[in-house]
Image: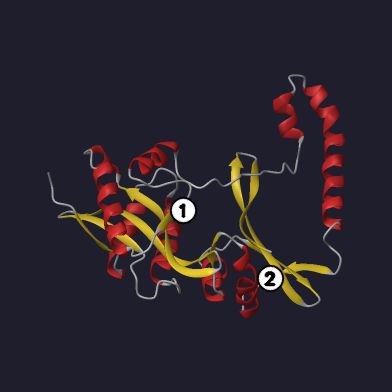
Amino acid sequence: MEAIRIRPLRPDDMPQIAAMQQTRDDVDAAGAAKRAELMRWLAFHNPSARGEATYFVAETADGIIGYHGRMPLEFAIAGAVRRGYFVHDLYVTPPARKKGLGFKVTMLIAQAIEQESPSFFGLLGMTPLNLEMQRLFGYFETAVPGLAKPLDPRRELHKRFKRPKAANLLTPFAKITLRLADLLLLDLPAAGVRVSPLKRFDEEVEALNHRLHPQTGISTFKSAAYLNWKYIDRPYPRETVLAARKDGRLSGYIIFSPTPYQKDSAVGIIIDLMA
């Protein structure tokens, strides 16, 4: 069995990382190049890292065969700010997986991240198999409700009605119902509130965090520098940021991003919300 060494990612590793992206089956060549550029940004420009490693690589005598990201940031827990981490972006090369090294590489990097993380870390976007594996290793899951709003009800109606004519007939009424719900919801809290695009985060956001985080259980405490790094200054930004102000004071913000859903449609996913 070939020896596998785990170490932090270095800037001079990026040519190998860029070549590894070309082996992915979920992106084309242009997408692989963008992914490598984005990984460089995440790895070496995170203002919350403060010198800590943000990626770990698995390396053999032939080169890097896998990597796993660890994103350092602050968490607000019952109002107190604590250092924590998010683990993300795991990849093992196809040749290594064919040799049966996929699980071993994953576990070796995970153990290295555990040893280098003095507090705790969370994982997002787990597959059922990965989630079951994490349970076996003593991690626990927290319930996060998922909500979706259909902006065009036609597709959903066609799924539920076998007769296309019935679905087509009901679509205008469904659109009217959704629009009425929007008007009612917007009218309830909107007294004195103005919503406008936010081009850059500043000290207003940090003041909002300090006001609201004592009311939360567990949440991430994001500085203006962190939010600008993640959503504004990053390569290929695609997020939209809206801010709500009441009496000239920032009262909340929302960040959402379009995500491909099917060949002819996309969904808008809310990826950050503070209010």
Residue 100 in picture, x, y percent from top left: 23, 38
Q: Nearer the viewer, mark 1 or mark 2?
A: 2
The mark found on residue 204 in the picture is none
Which residue type does callout 1 highlight? Gly
Give above or below for 160 relative to 8. above
Tell me: 166 left or right of 76: right
Tell me: 190 left or right of 3: right
Which quadrant of the figure has residue 116? bottom left
Give above or below for 163 relative to 133. above
Query: Quick one: SS at disc 1?
Result: helix
* Callout 1 touching callout 2 (CB < 8 Å): no
Which residue is the site of mark 2? 198
Which residue is the site of mark 1? 31
Give above or below for 15 relative to 147. below
What is the count of numbered marks? 2
Disc 2 residue crowd, few under 14, some 14–19, many 20+, Cα 10 Å: some
The structure residue drawn at horizontal position 39% and vertical position 75%, both measured from the top left corner, is: 50
Whole-Å distance between the Cαs marked 1 and 2? 28 Å
Quadrant placement of the C terminus: bottom right
Residue 241 in picture, x, y percent from top left: 66, 65
The structure residue drawn at horizontal position 79% and vertical position 27%, both measured from the top left corner, is: 167
Residue 23 in picture, x, y percent from top left: 34, 47
Which residue type does callout 2 highlight? Leu
Query: N-terminal of the two: label 1 or label 2?
Result: 1
Disc 1 residue crowd, few under 14, some 14–19, many 20+, Cα 10 Å: some
Give above or below for 212 relative to 61. below
Q: Which residue is most to the top?
A: 162
Q: Which residue is most to the front?
A: 78
The structure residue drawn at horizontal position 31% and vertical position 62%, both measured from the top left corner, is: 15
Residue 220 shows in this picture: yes
Query: Quick one: SS at disc 2?
Result: loop
